[in-house]
Image: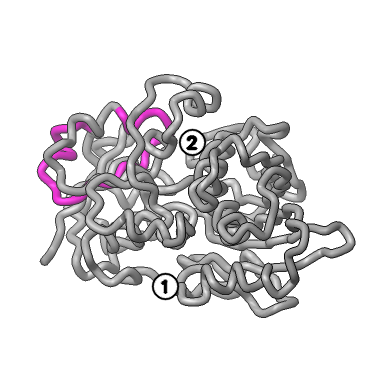
Amino acid sequence: MTYTVAVSGASGYAGGEILRLLAAHPDIEIRTVTAHSNAGQPLIQHQPHLRSLAHLTLQDTTPEVLAGHDIVFLALPHGQSGQYTDALGDVPLVIDAGADHRLTSQDAWDAFYGGVFHDPWTYGVPELPVSGSTQREALRGATRIAAPGCNASTVSLSLAPGVAAGVIDPGDIVSVLAVGPSGAGKSLKTNLLASEILGSANPYAVGGTHRHIPEIRQALAAAGSITPDSIRISFTPVIVPMARGILATSSAPIVEGVTDAEIRAAWEGAYGGETFVQLLPEGQFPRTADVLGANTALIGLAIDRAANRVTVVTAVDNLVKGTAGAAIQSMNIALGLPEDRALSVNGVAP
């Protein structure tokens, strides 16, 4: 069966990456691409690397244009997807790459985003440990999927096995992330100009203000069958001069009496059978270069007995495993297709 697809926000980074991956999907026909200010212009003018889609023209983003497809991807800025989702009730599968349907708590939404709160959808991180299983089970047959925030899913995948197994204390998590500026979107911002970021590392959203914090707490709480209030995290992202990528270094205290073998077994048990989330051998740690263009999250684990903490280093491509790849992997699961269809574990080097 071939599924017809519309992609909104197709002139942006996330929309472009969704299109790049879908273009290689044998079960997908990309029929419609939409934008706002760029409507009426050729897609190729804004995504010149997508040569196979040069025949497409960006249309206005309206419910009428998006309707009538089997699948709709919404790759819009946070707070803008919700105005369309209620009008797409007849579309069999809708996947939102924005934040509008990620959070289950309206209080958390009000505190970190503001504006209209929308009902939560099935969270699109298949490998995330959840109550003795994985989020994959909730995605089977899903009709509404909330793709994750790239930073949030990276930190959640890093620590969820330890929380689920009860070997780390989720009440004292520290995460520092080196992130590429593509995660901030394509719109012009002074702090993202090349002259501002080249040769520099720039922290932002310091002091517990980053919008992905409640998403991390929600995901880790689900992994440990505890409340989000039990999760305390100091989260600091730093923009570094690489177009793509996240390198997240996260640590948490070791629960008293837990052995080194039990700690490593928690991550091996969670990800030993996974294709796209891989635990590296002991003593090895990932680089962002190793996941460029791939749908993989590579994880290195260290046990620091001097500090009595576990340190987890995780690398992802923020536009693939962090966003578009997660969305398409979730789509495959929802439709009953092979989970890895149109997705690769292989990066691009050098």
Left or right: 49, with 43 as reference point? right
> Which of the 4 image quarters holds residue 51?
bottom left
Q: Nearer the viewer, residue 205 or 218?
A: 218
Q: Image height check: is 26 above or below 33? A: below
**Visible in this render: residue 206?**
yes
Q: Which residue is mark 2?
A: 187
Question: Could you tell me the amino acid type at mark 1?
Answer: Ser
Q: Which residue is mark 1?
A: 344
Image x and y of residue 315, in percent: 61, 62
In this rendering, which labeled residue sits more in front, label 2 or label 1? 1
Asked if residue 277 is among those painted magenta in the image, a careful observer would answer no
Q: Image height check: is 346 above or below 238? A: below
Asked if residue 65 is among those painted magenta in the image, a careful observer would answer yes
Crowd class of label 1 (few under 14; some 14 to 19; many from 20; radius 10 Å):
some
Image x and y of residue 46, in percent: 37, 47
The residues bearing labels 2 and 1 have C-alpha atoms spaced at a distance of: 28 Å
Image x and y of residue 284, in percent: 71, 76
Image x and y of residue 221, in percent: 53, 45
Q: Which image quarter holds the C terminus?
A: bottom right
Q: Residue at x 42, y 60 (%)?
A: 134
Left or right: 172, with 107 as reference point? right
Sequence-earlier tag: 2 or 1:
2
Q: Nearer the viewer, residue 260 or 252?
A: 260
Question: Could you tell me the amino acid type at mark 2?
Answer: Ser
Q: Which residues are magenta?
A: 62-82
Q: Which image quarter holds the N terminus?
A: bottom left
The residue sitting at the right extreme is 306
Q: Residue at x 63, y 55 (%)?
A: 242
Q: Secondary structure at mark 1?
A: loop
Q: Residue at x 42, y 62 (%)?
A: 133
Q: Secondary structure at mark 2?
A: loop
**Visible in this render: residue 244?**
no
